[in-house]
Image: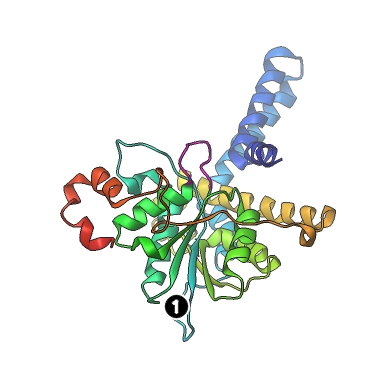
Amino acid sequence: MFELKKVVSSLLMPLPAMLILGFLGLVLIMFTARRKLGSLIILVSLCGTFLISFQPLSSRLLMPLERQYSAFLPINQTIDYVMVLGGGHVVDDQIPPTSELSRASLMRLSEGIRILRMYPGAKLILSGYDGGTGVSHARTMAKVALALGVSKPDIILLETAKDTWEEARQAAAFVQNKQLVLVTSASHMKRAMYEFEAAGLTPYPAPTNFLAQKEIEQAWQKYTPSSRYLEQTERYWHETTGLIWQDLREWVANEGNQEFMPSVSELESSADADKITQQDIEAQLAPEESQEPAKAQ
């Protein structure tokens, strides 16, 4: 079901949909007598591709979704956990650990570390499965967090969660009634808060990775189609379909009857061979070898 959901959602993204529509028009022109219809479909495909890459449209769609929650500011409350949701990674020993994380993941992790340092004694929860890479996303983020100075005892991994639904239920089983800050991309925060609240948690939202901006004055940036504006439209559509999926799922199933126990590990307490060690960090960051022991204790 998870793989089917991902395949279907990928095909329904704006760019693949426009390309499929364009190829359909081309097939009508080349192999049938309905050339006018085929030409019209190709025109719609080209106009659609222009519009989804056009800043006045893409930012107007995404900004209301991103700005539902404001940036996290210090609060007069004890925070026990800061949880960073997964966002994609690769495994490549030839590049820095920071480059193994997607842009969204790196921004989420950076925000999580920023908040963690506001609250001494808080723990950093990192989540995400391996996505077929052989190394969990949570562990990849932990490698970067260690390199950025977070202590191993302060890192907790949830390594089997595949989506936000699973992340929320694993977190609920682990965090219970303690205070939690939830870090994810601004466009994803509405859906994430829904899942965590449905799981019985009341986290403080900490959105990051804001993409949409309205104060763009240069005409050549505002009115020229661009891949970054296409990304904004795709993020809007991805989250919109995710919200629709949430409604459908709630309609056909009663989540309250499902039990989901987390797979939790703490970096400082495991003796497994695949756990991250300080030597792993030093080997990957050889130029900074002399500084690492002072950063991760």
Q: Quadrant of the N terminus?
A: top right
Is residue 175 among what the camera can see?
yes
The kind of secondary structure the magenta stretch mainly shows is: loop
Q: Is residue 132 magenta?
A: yes
Q: SS for tag 1?
A: loop
Residue 195 position by quadrant: bottom right
Nearest the eye: 99 or 43:
99
Q: Is residue 217 magenta?
A: no
Residue 174 position by quadrant: bottom right
Q: How is the image coloured?
A: rainbow
Q: Is residue 157 left or right of residue 195?
A: left
Q: Which residue does the image show at 41% across and 56% down from the upper left?
A: 267
Q: Which residue does the image show at 30% across and 39% down from the upper left?
A: 95
Q: Which residue does the image show at 30% across and 44% down from the upper left?
A: 96
- Residue 208 position within the rendered picture, expressed as x and y whole percent measured from the top left: 47, 63
Query: Which residue is the site of mark 1?
Result: 73
Kindly give the residue lying farthest to the right in the view shown.
252
- Residue 289 position within the rendered picture, expressed as x and y whole percent measured from the top left: 18, 50
Is residue 226 among what the camera can see?
no
Magenta range:
129-136
- Which amino acid, mark 1? Leu
Kindly give the residue lying farthest to the front in the view shown.
271
Q: Is residue 135 left or right of residue 164?
A: left
Kindly give the residue lying farthest to the bottom in the view shown.
76
Considering only vertical position in the picture, is 32 above or below 87? above
Residue 10 position by quadrant: top right
